[in-house]
Image: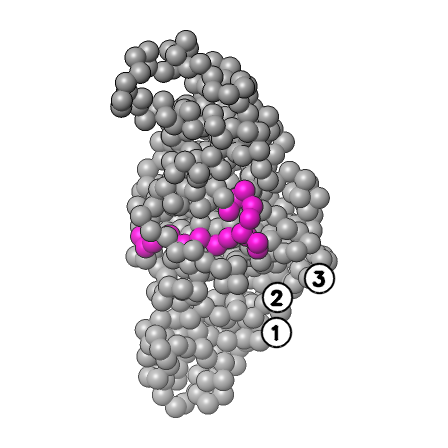
Amino acid sequence: MIKPDNSSQTSPQQIYDFAAQIFPIARSITGNGVRQTLAMIKQHLPGLEVFEIPSGTQAFDWQIPDEWNITDAYIMDESGRKVVDWQTNNLHVVSYSTPVNEIMSLDELDKHLHSLPEQPDAIPYVTSYYKPCWGFCLSHTLRQQLKNGSYRVVIDSQLKPGSLTYGELMIPGEEASEILLSTYVCHPSMANNECSGPAVTTFLAKWLLEQPRRRHTYRIVFIPETIGSIVYLSRNLEQMQRNIIAGFVVTCVGDNRDYSFMPSRLANTLADKVALHILRNHTEKFTPCSFLERGSDERQYCSPLVNLPVVSIMRSKYGKYPEYHTSLDNLSLISPEGLSGACELLKKCLIALEQNCIYTATTFCEPQLGKRNLYPTLSARGSVGAQTLLMRDILAYSDGKLDLIDIAGILGVSIEECCSIVELLLTHGLLKRVAASQN
């Protein structure tokens, strides 16, 4: 079982440096950018297995699209100056743009341009995965500066049968029960919305691998968002439904803003309970969200016929911070402290899941604690300390039905405070474990 003091030697700067390393990669839902990102993750996690699923493969109601890769793109004015250059920012091209190499007027070009008048200095992130088109994204300020005339428009891309790529790491534990960690590797250069999730998940996995004992098995996946989780579920659903007791989608975990919490569909799973317990006990403030505000892979994991116990603890929630899906979501938005803080909070969730069990008292009425040197021998007003009172309270609620997270919530303490006392009571035979935990 993972202990709270089994800490990692990873520094906050190491997590940030890895996020910065994968930041420049031109990713999409398929293609070489995903492979390059997974190769960098595999340098930290040699056991990561990479899967290639062919284009055209059916996955529930979806089909894997053709693979898309891009090597260059630009808009050049009549003087030969590249006014928009994909090489300087890979958000400049609509993801999955079809190839183009034409000379056209500004009026014709403008039909294929995307900008944000309300954020005039930001380059928007735009995609068109399932309907062929092409386009460029640029700041609204630059768009307004384009002069009438002819422009050479080049997108050197390929859209042809290939495959969808994802990575999976299974870390075995003493029990078959699984905890899912899922993050996505499909957005281009955005720091909080993209790079923070794979970076934090990579170092969470490294920490798990360092542990001498793990009670649960850990299923860790690096996938393209939406189509990737659908494909992954289509290949692994039966085992996941049988074994997963809790899961976390890891995304938007890099900035220094308040935490946000996305519950499961009915907000009643073990993952919900543990996440809320840790957030309430270890953060000053967090924003609870409604599942009606969902937007990441919890949509797939929590869908009715899948119905896995999956939640998400984030910093700034996707869609809610002003830099979201723009070039403003850059490396200055995230920080070593932001990434490390989220990583440590998720570690606490995993430790709580490792520690959480259902216990039952072994004696009728209260046990005689004094003869076990667990109670003061002199009874006087105020002689019973807080630890002894907590011990009695844990015994009072250990009824074979409530798990340790439930009991900690009733008593208004953290699960960490309960665990040392539970170990003491187990040593003296006053408690026994009757089940792993409530699912």
Amino acid on which disc 3 is placed: Asp
- Between label 2 and label 1, give the one nearer the viewer: 1
Q: Which quadrant of the figure has residue 189?
A: bottom left
Amino acid on which disc 2 is placed: Leu
Is there a contact, CB below 8 Å, between mark 3 and mark 1?
no
Residue under pointer 1: 132
- Label of residue 159 in the image: 2
Cα separation between marks 3 and 2? 22 Å
- Magenta run includes residue 262: yes
**Does the image show residue 83?**
no
Within 10 angstroms of label 3, few (less than 14), some, or many (20 or more) residues?
Answer: few
- Label of residue 236 in the image: none
Residue under pointer 3: 61
Mark 2 or mark 1: name the one nearer the start of the chain.
Answer: 1
Q: Secondary structure at mark 2?
A: strand
- In the image, 102 versus 360, the foreground residue is 360
Which residues are the magenta region? 255-272
- Relative to residue 31, is residue 220 depicted above or below? above
Q: Position of residue 27 (x, y in %)?
A: 50, 58
- Between label 3 and label 2, give the one nearer the viewer: 3
Amino acid on which disc 1 is placed: Pro
- Residue at 40% from the left image edge and 51% from the top image edge: 253
- Most common secondary structure along the magenta stretch: loop
Is there a contact, CB below 8 Å, between mark 2 and mark 1?
yes
Mark 3 or mark 2: name the one nearer the start of the chain.
Answer: 3
- Relative to residue 11, is residue 235 depicted above or below? below
- Residue at 43% from the left image edge and 55% from the top image edge: 288
Q: Position of residue 241 (x, y in %)?
A: 66, 44
